[in-house]
Amino acid sequence: MQKQKLDCQKEVIEILKVLMDKVKKEWSSNGNPFADTQILTDKVMTYEHNSDESKGWTGTRSNISEKPKDSNVVLLVTYDGVGYYYFSYCADFGSGMLTDKLQEELKKRFGDRFNIEHCNNWAFEVYDNEDLEC
């Protein structure tokens, strides 16, 4: 079963990389728009909530943490720079939101198995909704 999960993870990453490569071709002479993008398979986004003003900050802080063994997160994608315009829910630029295109491609390939959730304006996670074979 573990090998099947890794195969599915590789397929999801490959779909994402194909979408990113299409954008890179458009940018060919302007550098790599995803130079600051990381695709992490062993991390998840966690959140720290604080209402104690004595700590010097209040609100919610996002943190990248080790992925627990029972996590259904397939991958965490972090981005900055130009990647923000292609991934963030706060912007729509170029050929459109790659996260929307990624969700469409995942749905074509896997049905409703995978879901994308934006963690903040610099990261999103892809979740596995099922424990099935690819």
Image: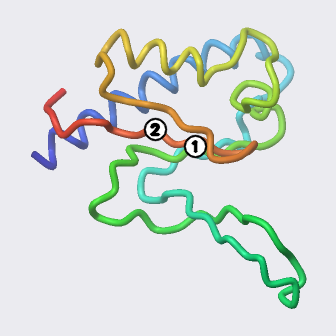
Image side of residue 8 versus residue 106, left or right? left
Provide the residue designation for mark 2. Answer: 126
Q: Quick one: quadrant of the C terminus?
A: top left
Q: Secondary structure at mark 2?
A: strand
Residue farthest to the bottom, as pictured: 54
Provide the residue designation for mark 1. Answer: 77
Q: Based on the displayed image, in which of its 4 quarters is residue 128 positioned?
A: top left
Q: In x, y percent, where is residue 16? A: 50, 26
Q: In x, y percent, where is residue 117? A: 54, 37
Q: In x, y percent, where is residue 119? A: 63, 46
At a point 68% along the width and 71% down the height, the residue shown is 49
Eyeballing the image, is 2 above or below 90? Answer: below
**Nearest the eye: 101 or 112:** 112
Q: Secondary structure at mark 1?
A: strand
At a point 44% along the width and 21% down the height, the residue shown is 15
Of badges 1 and 2, the one in the foreground is 2
Colour mapping used in the image: rainbow
Q: Amino acid at mark 2?
A: Val
Q: Earlier in the sequence, mark 1 or mark 2?
A: 1
At a point 83% along the width and 87% down the height, the residue shown is 55
Residues at marks 1 and 2 touching, judged by CB atoms closer than 8 Å:
yes
**Nearest the eye: 102 or 39:** 102
At a point 25% along the width and 43% down the height, the residue shown is 6
Dot 1, how many residues are within 10 Å of its Cα: few (below 14), some (14-19), or many (20+)? many
Q: Quick one: quadrant of the N terminus?
A: top left
Q: Amino acid at mark 1?
A: Val
**Nearest the eye: 118 or 80:** 118
